[in-house]
């Protein structure tokens, strides 16, 4: 079982890769809309990647209103 | 289609539709790639009537208000029908609002019943906003886990009475059908009072140009609380015997799959999603080998030549099979609404033989005011007024641009509990839209920015500055005020609209990095589409009324004297 820290780090790594951002430039409290310059649709695409990676299903309502990696990680962690 | 001229109410029309089209499929609900539900009109009625009866047993009666806060799904429409059947007034609220905002509107609407989903109720019931919601007597929650704490709510699935048939409660055309909030979550609530006549007339006007019939499948993606989806994703298709397809996720991959899986006929999208589709198609085209790309361009050119005067769907589908097949091959039009769409995006799809029904409207006017009738297709306008709409341009400047105003049976009767705002908005029967436009020689309306202090995002969200100001309360400055940048420095554009925070610092105070960080942190508490984009520093006292309210229009005029390029500090 992953720890929350591990989950968070894996999310940051995946987001860096998906949006071509140098590894290490993203941090847990970053607002991903702002930091990555993405819109709500791109966020949904990112979520699909994360679901595949973690092998879970994350309903849209679970991530509604979430804009930082830390909160996203906790929502994912609760479903692992 | 039912002859809606004969009907007095939304409920009466829907009731007859359920009988007339009993064996047709009316609803399909899918979660990702799994189909969860497929109902005929008869089965829909069988689900709705026990709910209607249980509502009646619970004391819900004519003119009582019931709110729905749900994502797009079959239970939204079943619940709405039950409310109309029992003579109630529907209050559709946006599930994306915060719980505090939802409580604020529930209280303002005096809703007696709330129908919602478990994840939403979990947040609502934990919110402090719940205190003082004295009118709310019954809460129905869908899809709650078996051992869930419902905090006083009932399970939607169990709230039914099969002991007897419910009694249909007739309503008159001028009675209230829905209370639709166009804004006002943070400030002055704008509850648009929509009558049964508003919906009946709008439906007749829209379906005269974009008809539905049994066998048509409408993909419902826009939230059903939105005026467009309520009309073309519920009332319109139901009164014509068509089917509505709901997806429980908006992941682009499943939306794409739904087109071909369910052979979609119509879909409504906001500009953001339409542009995303365009981007995807463009990327696909760019990946084609040079020869195939040239062949595709040639076919597009042929399609352009043959569809100049009007769409030829059959021809376009044959010519551009590789484009149309992923859309299911049955798509007749994409309805785009909620915000302004850039002409090049509209043209892109039309050139591929996929007409985009571009239009213009606002909740207060009963959804759509103008729509592109595609004869011929015009990407540079928002179309011509719908049948039954009188549209005029007030106080036009020398170039013909003025405020768009509308008179029609589809215009709301007013704002709930706000006669003052109603009187400012509807003058001598004309609804003043606050949008600037002009008619071209062919009778098409073109839009040129706004007169009102608000923005509309590409996701179709209307954001009023007053609604987000509370997040900046107690900011360590002398005074502040949020504005739409376009309201201060009009640009005659409907895209790329931004919000700004005007700041008046204390005497001797300077704009420090700490202050910027404080503003950013507060800004980030807002949903991403509600955030301000920049700051403007102003070194005079804000003009105020006798009751010390900021005179926004006067302050805007004063700020307009500043050079935007220098004054606007991006956040």
Image (tube, coloured by chain):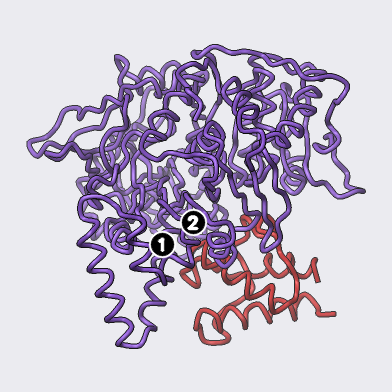
Chain colours: A red, B purple
Q: Position of residue B271 (x, y in %)?
A: 40, 54
Judging depth in this view, the residue of B138 and B467 nearest the camera is B138
Which disc, if any, is residue B350? Answer: none
Q: Is residue B529 above or below residue B194?
A: below
- Identified at 71% across, 61% down, the residue is B34
**According to the image, label 1 marks what residue?**
B571
Label 1 residue SS: loop
**According to the image, label 2 marks what residue?**
B519
Q: Quadrant of residue B291?
A: bottom left
Q: Position of residue B244 (x, y in %)?
A: 58, 45
Does any portion of residue A31 appear in the rendered image? no
Chain of residue at mark 2: B
| Category of crowding for the residue at label 2, using alpha-carbon neighbours closer than 10 angstroms: few (below 14), some (14–19), many (at least 20) | some
Q: Please indicate whether residue B350 sits to the left or right of residue B254 in the image.
A: left
Q: Position of residue B22 (x, y in %)?
A: 66, 33
Label 2 residue SS: helix
């Amino acid at each position: 079982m992953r720890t929350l820290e591990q989950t968070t780090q894996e999310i940051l790594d995946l987001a860096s890769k998906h949006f071509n951002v140098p590894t290490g430039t993203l941090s847990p409290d970053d607002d991903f809309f702002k930091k990555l310059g993405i819109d709500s649709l791109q966020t949904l695409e990112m979520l699909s990647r994360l679901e595949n990676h973690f092998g879970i299903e994350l309903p849209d309502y679970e991530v509604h209103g979430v804009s930082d990696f830390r909160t996203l990680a906790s929502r994912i962690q609760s479903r692992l | 289609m039912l002859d809606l001229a004969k009907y007095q109410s939304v409920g009466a029309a829907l009731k007859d539709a359920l009988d007339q089209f009993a064996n047709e499929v009316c609803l399909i609900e899918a979660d990702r790639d799994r189909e969860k539900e497929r109902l005929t009109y008869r089965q829909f009625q069988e689900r709705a009537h026990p709910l209607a009866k249980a509502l009646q047993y619970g004391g819900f009666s004519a003119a009582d208000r019931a709110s729905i806060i749900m994502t797009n799904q079959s239970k939204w429409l079943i619940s709405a029908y039950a409310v109309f059947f029992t003579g109630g007034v529907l209050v559709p609220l946006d599930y994306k609002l915060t719980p505090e905002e939802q409580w604020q509107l529930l209280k303002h609407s005096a809703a007696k019943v709330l129908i919602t989903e478990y994840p939403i109720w979990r947040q609502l019931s934990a919110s402090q906003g719940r205190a003082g919601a004295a009118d709310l007597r019954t809460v129905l929650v869908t899809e709650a886990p078996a051992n869930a704490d419902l905090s006083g709510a009932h399970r939607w699935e169990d709230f039914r009475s099969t002991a007897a048939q419910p009694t249909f409660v007739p309503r008159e055309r001028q009675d209230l059908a829905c209370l639709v909030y166009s804004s006002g979550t943070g400030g002055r609530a704008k509850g648009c009072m929509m009558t049964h006549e508003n919906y009946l007339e709008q439906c007749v006007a829209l379906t005269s140009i974009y008809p539905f019939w049994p066998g048509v499948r409408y993909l419902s993606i826009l939230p059903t609380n939105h005026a467009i989806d309520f009309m073309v994703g519920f009332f319109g298709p139901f009164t014509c015997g068509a089917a509505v397809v709901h997806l429980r996720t908006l992941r682009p991959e499943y939306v794409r799959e739904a087109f071909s899986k369910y052979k979609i006929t119509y879909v409504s999208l906001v500009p953001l999603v339409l542009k995303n589709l365009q981007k995807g198609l463009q990327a696909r085209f760019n990946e084609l080998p040079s020869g195939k790309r040239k062949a595709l361009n040639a076919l597009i050119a042929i399609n352009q030549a043959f569809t100049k005067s009007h769409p030829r769907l059959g021809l376009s589908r044959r010519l551009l099979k590789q484009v149309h097949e992923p859309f299911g091959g049955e798509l007749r039009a994409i309805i785009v609404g909620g915000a302004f769409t850039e002409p090049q995006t509209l043209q892109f799809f039309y050139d591929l033989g996929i007409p985009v029904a571009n239009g213009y409207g606002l909740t207060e006017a009963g959804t759509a005011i103008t729509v592109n009738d595609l004869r011929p297709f015009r990407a540079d306008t928002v179309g011509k007024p719908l049948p039954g709409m009188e549209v005029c341009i007030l106080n036009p400047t020398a170039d013909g641009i003025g405020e768009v105003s509308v008179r029609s049976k589809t215009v709301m009767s007013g704002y709930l509990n706000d006669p003052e705002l109603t009187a400012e908005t509807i003058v001598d029967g004309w609804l003043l839209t606050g949008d600037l436009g002009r008619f071209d020689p062919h009778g098409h309306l073109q839009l040129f920015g706004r007169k009102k202090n608000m923005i509309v995002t590409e996701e179709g969200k209307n954001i009023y500055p007053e609604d987000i100001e509370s997040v900046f309360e107690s900011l360590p400055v002398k005074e502040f005020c949020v504005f739409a940048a376009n309201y201060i420095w009009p640009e005659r554009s409907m895209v790329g609209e931004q919000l700004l925070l005007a700041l008046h610092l204390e005497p001797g105070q300077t704009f420090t990095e700490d202050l910027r960080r404080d503003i950013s942190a507060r800004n980030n508490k807002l949903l991403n589409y509600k955030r301000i984009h920049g700051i403007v520093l102003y070194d005079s006292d804000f003009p105020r009324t006798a009751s010390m309210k900021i005179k926004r229009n006067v302050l805007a005029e004063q700020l307009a004297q500043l050079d935007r390029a220098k004054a606007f500090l991006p956040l």
